[in-house]
Image (cartoon, rainbow, N blue to C red):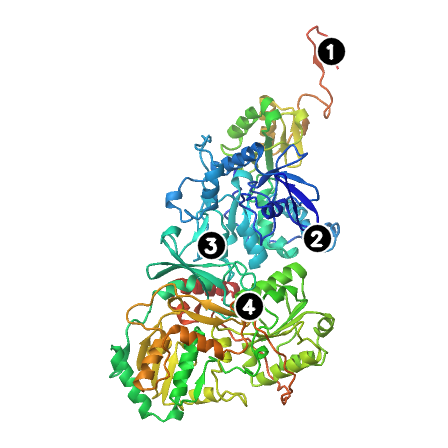
Amino acid sequence: MPKIIINNKEIEFENGMTVLQACELAGEEIPRFCYHERLSIAGNCRMCLVEMEKSSKPIASCAMPATDGMKIKTNTEMVEKARKGVMEFLLANHPLDCPVCDQGGECDLQDQSLYYGFDKSRFKENKREVKDKYMGPLIKTIMTRCIHCTRCVRFATEIGGVTEIGAIGRGENMEITTYLEKSMESELSANVIDLCPVGALTSKPYAFEARPWELKKTETIDVMDGVGSNIRVDTYGWEVKRILPRLNDNINEEWISDKTRYACDGLLKQRLDKPYKRENGKLVESNWDEVIDIIYSKINETEKSKIAGHIGDMQSLETINSFKSLLESLNINNYDFREKPFYINPKNKINYIFNSSIKGIEKSDFILLIGSNPRLEATMVNARIRKNFVLKKTPIFSIGDAGDLTYDYKIIGNKTEDIKKFLNNESQASKIFLKSKYPIIIIGESALQLASGRSIFENLKKFLIEQNFISDKWNALNILIQNASTVGAIDLDFLKDYKKNNLEFFDNIKNNKFKLLYFVGSDNLDFTKKDEFVIYQGSHGDHRAQAADIILPSPAFTEQNGLFINLEGRLQKSVKSSYPPGEAKEDWKIFNLIHQKFKYNNIFNSFKELRDKTLNKVKNHSDFGLLPETKIDKEDSDLDNLADETININELDYYFSNSVARSSKTMSECRSVRLKNIKNKTGT
Amino acid sequence: MSLKKVYDKQPESFEFTKDNLDLAKRILEKYPKGKEKSAVMPLLYLAQSQNNNWIPLAALKYIGNYLSMPYVNVYEIATFYSMYNLAPVGKYFLQICTTSPCLLRGANEIVKVCQSKISKDKDTISNNGLCSWTEVECLGACVNAPVMQVNNDYYEDLDKINTEKILNSFIEDKPLKPGSYRGRKNTAPEKKQNNNGANNA
């Protein structure tokens, strides 16, 4: 390995590294504004100047490739003087408004001016002023503070895939702008707020809410979609003030989607804080003893086969397991977790997870989407596909029109016929597929929802096994799960009777066959109430609570501990960062109450006991944060032929996809802006 | 220099004329395959010459589509370079060099003449609609300082009186000849009397 001498210390570095990266290896901290590990190199802030032997001028270390035998010094007088000079130029036009700036306390410029700043300004001329730009409901702009690092421009172009931000003009007149003053059309747009090293781009919903040092920070995970992005929840009292991404290279790198970040204001609104019961058609406040009594008598009155349970999209493993054990104690056999009747084969873990793994997408050399729109269904997965596309120009195909995915892909049809062609190696994509080493086939819930969903899945699986693409080395079979609780619920067998298409539950719901329904946080299930008795246990007064006869308030995902399994099968911990309002009780404690009422003794004595018992039931999980061990089954299930059907990708109301998001003001603003943009585009 | 103002009355659409489209194709051929986006600068210039020496936003969009590059990138380029005009200019567009050598030789005088004869502010079209002027950085003709570029021609070795004459000719729409106004041929040395009276070539 080549060697470089940094401050008289010799270290080895990898070929292709820059001087800045080598300095970091040597443990030297280099100040920077424009350089960012995940973005292209711009070299325009000049803060990272270092001294190189045989160079009369200091060099920008972020843009200089490290070479063998180079001698770098980072602590000389020349370096310090150069950096001070740069800092003075940066501050010449930067307003001194730190006391009213939201970035204060976590501002790169503030921090670095502590070391390289001048105590007073020699700049006697007028400071420039820049007009603020409109960048949508999430990003607040104070462009006078901008130091033109162009991180936001590079992020939008490279990671977001929407070239909508640019730097116009030059020199002193340079400005960062979005053209036509419109919001950024990306689900990742708010990441530019984290990237901005100064207070030019700050968070609009969080404006003047709190200072970073006043907030309690909890490291947890997100449940807005199946990805399980790693997040940090910042709370002030019980209020969740903001959500920030946490670094996890395997899942979300250091980005999160706008929904993950900004649905949190929905945690403060529409909350259920007391038990309610329905009296004379109206919901009235009640208390725990009374509602549990009502539930007890109703369950006793009703025939067991007419009782059903359903669990929602953001429930932890513990909730699912304790609910299941309640249903089992009561001898109730109808339960499900799915919101839409899609086919799932729960026999083996590889049948319902994203086997190639999110990080594995980067390795892939062929991607086929079947009935899936990853941009909306799993934004971070889409960002990874885009990363692969940008770096390797990987051919991407889709069966079914997924709309704009921020990268180029080819639609090779929208019929099951096209899948058949692919299986017979007669498709346009087949030639590339057969040559590829690490192909990825992503099957979306929209495809599994078709009448031929079962045969689509089973035939594809068989085909991939035949092609030797489901092996210990590489597994090309991927199901794109949309909800955070789905994989966990399948692992805990929270669905009954999967011999046929296991969709009986949905038929019964649709035909109002059940007499008593117990919903745990399930607001998205399509259900029209007739004369059923409905128990709703959840955190938000959303669709389902309005139609409920009994409401049991429970905490939202940030307010109780829990485990989640993401779409790759990674087990992750969600940590309690706030507490629920009013009399809300944790889900497992509510089930315990009902258990006790029925005088069953198999209650959970502590949360730890519940967690241990739950983990025992989860099929082949690994340790926290790791991919599960999977076994490959070669058993042949009886295959049907593919029926002729059109694959339409279900429209997903991205900003309104769950009860927290629906309660969020920010999300509804985003939604109306997006709808307006769509309207303008089609010209209607 | 300040940030270029974009004209507020923009035409709806823009398209290359047939001749210019042929020209654009020939320009594209100069660039290697996959690098066609580099042609954005000559194409912008082509659009400017087609549209009375200024580029409307519709043309930026048109060129963006033509080269399949994002609109905002074309916009960045058009605002970066001073030779692209994003607002209408006069039929005679006067660019006065005010960089050091010209300034030392009296460019300020020329600016003052422009202010009195054409318009008080730069980048503003004169009352009769024929002229507009602006200050630019070095035009690269320091040897003939002070210098003024009018459309594609240079007027060199100017002084106050000559500039007034030249400006009047533009205002009357009968432009005088470009070149040196002190009788020099191109950049040839000037004939000048020495202190002892002898001619010094």
Name the amino acid, label 3: Met
What distance separates the C-alpha of mark 3 from that of mark 4? Answer: 38 Å
Q: Is residue A117 visible?
A: yes
Q: Residue at x 41, y 87 (%)?
A: A328
Q: Nearer the viewer, mark 3 or mark 4?
A: 4
* Residue A104 vs residue A151, the one in the foreground: A104
Residue named by callout 4: A626
The label shown at residue A135 is 3
The reply to whether the C-beta atoms of the residues labelled 3 and 1 are less than 8 Å apart is no
The label shown at residue A30 is none
Residue named by callout 2: B35
Look at the picture and state if A410 lies above or below A637: above
What distance separates the C-alpha of mark 2 from that of mark 4? Answer: 43 Å
- Quarter holding residue B99: top right
First-in-chain label (2 vs 1): 2
Left or right placement of residue A372 versus residue A278 in this view: right
Residue A306 coordinates in the image, percent (x, y): 39, 91
Name the amino acid, label 2: Lys
Name the amino acid, label 4: Leu
First-in-chain label (3 vs 4): 3
The chain letter under disc 2 is: B
Residue B23 coordinates in the image, percent (x, y): 72, 50
**Secondary element at image label 3:** loop
Q: Are marks 2 and 4 on the same chain?
A: no
Q: Nearer the viewer, mark 3 or mark 1?
A: 3
Residue A194 coordinates in the image, percent (x, y): 48, 53
The chain letter under disc 1 is: B
Name the amino acid, label 1: Asn
